[in-house]
Amino acid sequence: MVDFLNPQADTRVEERPLATRTGGLAGKRVALLDNQKANAGHLLQSVGSVLTARHPELQLTTELKIATSPSPPEVMDRLRNVDAVVLAIAD
């Protein structure tokens, strides 16, 4: 007799609600979070240019993190003070 073992585990998916939408960008504070991968900075710079061209009153900031690590506490503290964050993953 041969026993077969199935190595697959049940999938665990934690459902999370979508973030609350800002209702428009007029007067909002938006952070661009650069994970410092090869093209992330270039992509975010382009996104930032488009955003500020369309919404001149937008307050735009840029933060840096290391792609393979969580954002440092001081970066997270600053991100808590913005209305939206844009992250680019641009390998």
Image (tube, rainbow, N blue to C red):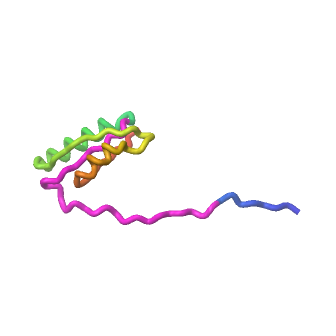
On the image, the x and y values in percent for residue 51 come to 19, 47
Horizontal placement of 43 versus 53: left or right? right
Q: Nearer the viewer, residue 3 or 72?
A: 72
Q: Quadrant of the N terminus?
A: bottom right
Against 80, residue 36 (above or below) is: above
Horizontal placement of 8 versus 46: left or right? right
Most common SS among magenta residues: loop
Q: Nearer the viewer, residue 71 or 44?
A: 71
Name which residue lies at 69% across and 58% down. Answer: 7
Horizontal placement of 7 versus 71: left or right? right
* Residue 12 shown in magenta: yes
On the image, the x and y values in percent for residue 23 come to 19, 62
Q: Quadrant of the C terminus?
A: top left
Name which residue lies at 40% across and 64% down. Answer: 16
* Residue 48 shown in magenta: no
Q: Which residues are magenta?
A: 9-36
